[in-house]
Image (spheres, rainbow, N blue to C red):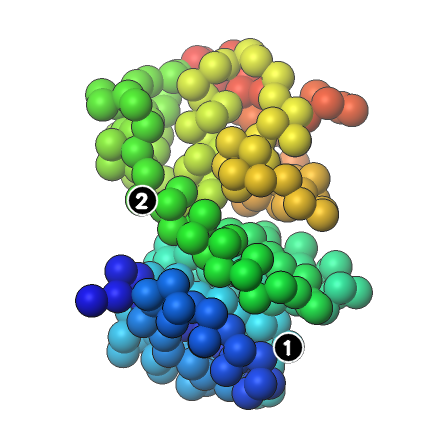
């Protein structure tokens, strides 16, 4: 039986067919859709393990598909974007997409990125017991974070960033270090990707994300988990 299921969403049938062949060679169960409305219906009916989602779709856009899914699910999403669509790419990351690949791309790279995302989504750390930092409890086995006993709705990528920073309060991590820990590999645009995920995290953990106290920026370097989280 296939180990994972993937929903490929692209309005170009040739691209969808090409990607399908590569994923099937890697023992994936593959669903395909060529527009946003069909993608949402297939997602709700079949509950795939991951989506590979083109942003440029007829009717319901890829951004709208991402927005709808993130309302009630943390299913991983890999975006496909044109090289000059930086704004849409950043919006997609802010909506909760886990990663992106720019067109033109190598099908092997897309499959490799999907495998890396799925590994991150299911992987647990060596710690078997939850650990606390300030008001936060990080359950490394359950892959979850709660604040004062209330569970936070984090995507897998947001969780990995939070766990990395919270496990070493006060230590400054460069964006390169963070992307290696979270994504497994550095790639073009990784700094913007990390910044977008941190921005999302701040909305979920800070009372005032515009003046963040918990995850602080160390200008010219990266980020750190602040001692203010212990207050």
Disc 1 element: loop
Viewer-nearest residue: 175 or 12: 12
| Quadrant placement of the N terminus | bottom left
Viewer-nearest residue: 151 or 36: 36
Q: Is residue 198 visible?
A: no
220 versus 72 height, above or below: above
Q: Are marks 2 and 1 in contact (CB under 8 Å)?
A: no
* 70 on left or right of 47: right
* 209 on left or right of 102: left
Q: Residue at x 64, y 77 (%)?
A: 56
Name the image quarter holding residue 47.
bottom left
Q: Residues within 10 Å of mark 2 (few under 14, many from 20)?
A: few
What residue did someone put label 1 on?
Answer: 56
Q: Is residue 76 visible?
A: yes
User: Of callouts 2 and 1, which one flags the residue occurring earlier in the amino acid sequence?
Assistant: 1
Q: Residues within 10 Å of mark 1 (few under 14, many from 20)?
A: many
What residue did someone put label 2 on?
Answer: 122
Name the image quarter holding residue 200.
top right
* 169 on left or right of 41: right
Residue 212 position in % (x across, y down): 60, 29
Disc 2 element: helix
Residue 80 position in % (x across, y down): 60, 66
16 versus 216 height, above or below: below
How many marks are shown on the rendered structure? Answer: 2
227 versus 152 height, above or below: above
Q: Residue at x 38, y 63 (%)?
A: 26
Residue 113 position in % (x across, y down): 51, 53
Disc 2/disc 1 C-alpha distance (Å): 29 Å
Q: Residue at x 36, y 82 (%)?
A: 41
Residue 202 position in % (x across, y down): 54, 37
């Amino acid at each position: 039986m296939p180990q994972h299921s993937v929903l490929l969403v692209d309005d170009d049938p040739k691209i969808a067919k090409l990607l399908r062949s590569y994923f099937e060679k890697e023992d994936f169960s593959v669903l395909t859709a060529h527009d946003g409305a069909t993608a949402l219906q297939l997602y709700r009916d079949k509950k795939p393990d991951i989506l590979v989602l083109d942003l440029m779709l007829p009717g319901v856009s890829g951004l709208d598909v991402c927005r709808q899914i993130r309302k009630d699910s943390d299913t991983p999403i890999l975006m496909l974007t044109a090289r000059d669509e930086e704004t849409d790419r950043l919006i997609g990351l802010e909506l909760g997409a886990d990663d992106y690949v720019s067109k033109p791309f190598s099908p092997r790279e897309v499959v490799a990125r999907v495998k890396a995302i799925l590994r991150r989504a299911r992987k647990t750390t060596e710690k078997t017991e939850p650990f606390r930092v300030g008001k936060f409890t990080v359950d490394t086995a359950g892959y979850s974070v709660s604040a004062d006993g209330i569970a936070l709705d984090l995507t897998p990528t947001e969780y990995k960033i939070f766990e990395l920073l919270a496990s070493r309060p006060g230590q400054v991590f460069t964006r390169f270090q963070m992307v290696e820990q979270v994504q497994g590999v550095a790639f073009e645009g990784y700094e913007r990707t990390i910044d977008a995920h941190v921005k999302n995290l701040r909305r979920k953990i800070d009372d005032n994300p515009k003046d963040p106290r918990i995850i602080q920026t160390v200008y010219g370097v990266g980020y750190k988990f602040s001692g203010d989280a212990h207050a």
